Image: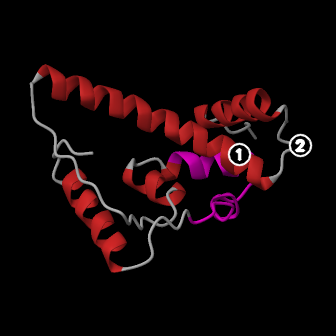
Amino acid sequence: MAEAKQPKEVQKILERLKNRYGKTIENASKEELYKASAICIRDEIVSMWLEANRQINKQKLKKVYYMSAEFLMGRAFRNNLLNLGLEGRYRKAFDYLGLELEDIAAQERDARLGNGGLGRLAACFLDALATGGYPAV
């Protein structure tokens, strides 16, 4: 039986483990695996963000700036994977490494940047702006 092809996300995660934490898959904690994976996901977000800003500047579009004292987004790891269409790729990578996506995602702490309705409203408002494709911060 042929060995499954290594997903590119596996190499990215292993590189982050080595370069950030001085660890290998054999001696990394679940928290370190979560953080290494989160950095990989953040790198993809940053690439997309830079390209979006390039397009906004090229088209000379105006941006909406929204400020709120509360901001209640909840955990971002799974949300980012889902919104970026990366969940399947990272699930395959974790399967390849003998890990469960749910176990790694469970390592994320809730930032608790808000405490109620206004924070949830701010999060929904920004989500709606992003879904609508509006340039907003």
Q: What stretch is highlighted in magenta?
A: 89-110
Q: Tell which of 80 and 111 is nearer to you.
A: 111
Determine which quarter of the picture holds residue 109: bottom right
| Mark toward the start of the polypeptide (2 vs 1) | 2
State the residue at coordinates (22%, 45%): 136
Q: Where is residue 75 in the image (x, y as percent from the top left)?
A: 52, 63
State the residue at coordinates (50%, 51%): 88
24 above or below 89? above
Say what secondary structure mark 1 lies in: helix
Q: Is residue 96 magenta?
A: yes
Q: Position of residue 72 (x, y in %)?
A: 42, 68
The residue type indicated by label 1 comes to Tyr
Which residue lies most toward the front here? Answer: 69
Quick check: 69 left or right of 21? left
State the residue at coordinates (50%, 53%): 87
- Quadrant occupied by the C terminus: top left
Q: Residue 96 carries which label?
A: 1
Say what secondary structure mark 2 lies in: loop
Q: In the rendered image, is residue 40 in sight?
A: yes
75 above or below 34? below
The residue type indicated by label 2 comes to Glu
Q: How many marks?
A: 2
Quick check: 81 left or right of 134? right
Which residue lies most toward the top here? Answer: 58
Location of mark 2 (residue): 26
- What colour scheme was applied to this rendering of the protein? secondary structure
Q: Is residue 128 magenta?
A: no
